[in-house]
Image (cartoon, rainbow, N blue to C red):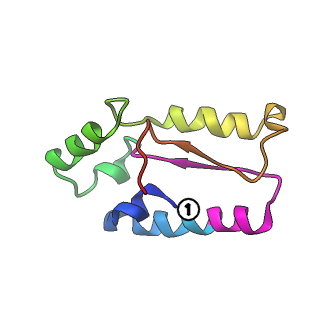
């Protein structure tokens, strides 16, 4: 499940709904594709309406000690779109900097 859904972050609830739907589709139909699930990525959507304390809380919760950047996710998407992923099917690859929410 998308980390933002699990944490109940309302400001990105539509993204959470969309991501959860894609993850469910991948798992139900076991398609050849895979799905990337990112953690907190430094984008306008993440910063919108959040206090500096809230942002620092996300940074502190991340074992990597930083927010992700779009290139962190792009590298995984690039791998999943390449022929190198031939043995990776129907997986959700986490790009979360080590944040695990259960």
Chain part drawn in magenta: 22-40
Name the residue at the front extreme. Answer: 102
7 relative to 81 in the view: left or right: left
71 relative to 84 in the view: left or right: left
Quadrant of the frame with the C terminus: bottom left
Q: Residue 32 location, x and y as percent?
A: 83, 53
The residue depicted at 21 percent of the width and 40 percent of the height is: 56
Q: Residue 79 location, x and y as percent?
A: 71, 34
Q: Residues within 10 Å of mark 1 (few under 14, many from 20)?
A: many
Q: Residue 39 location, x and y as percent?
A: 44, 46
Vertical position of residue 31 compared to residue 74: above or below: below
Q: Is residue 6 covered in magenta?
A: no
The residue depicted at 34 percent of the width and 51 percent of the height is: 46
Which quarter of the figure has residue 6?
bottom left
Q: Residue 27 location, x and y as percent?
A: 71, 63
Q: Which residue is mark 1?
A: 19
Vertical position of residue 48 compared to residue 42: above or below: below
| Circle 1 SS class | helix
Q: Nearer the viewer, residue 12 or 91?
A: 91
Vertical position of residue 48 compared to residue 61: above or below: below
61 relative to 86 in the view: left or right: left
The residue depicted at 35 percent of the width and 48 percent of the height is: 44
The residue depicted at 35 percent of the width and 61 percent of the height is: 7
Figure label count: 1
């Amino acid at each position: 499940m998308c980390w933002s859904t699990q944490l109940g972050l309302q400001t990105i609830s539509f993204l959470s709904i969309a991501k959860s739907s894609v993850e469910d589709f991948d798992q139900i139909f076991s398609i050849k594709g895979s799905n990337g699930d990112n953690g907190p990525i430094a984008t306008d959507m993440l910063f919108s309406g959040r206090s500096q304390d809230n942002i620092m809380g996300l940074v502190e919760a991340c074992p990597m000690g930083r927010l992700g950047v779009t290139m962190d996710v792009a590298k995984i998407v690039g791998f999943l779109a390449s022929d190198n992923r031939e043995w990776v099917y129907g997986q959700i690859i986490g790009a979360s900097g080590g944040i695990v929410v259960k």
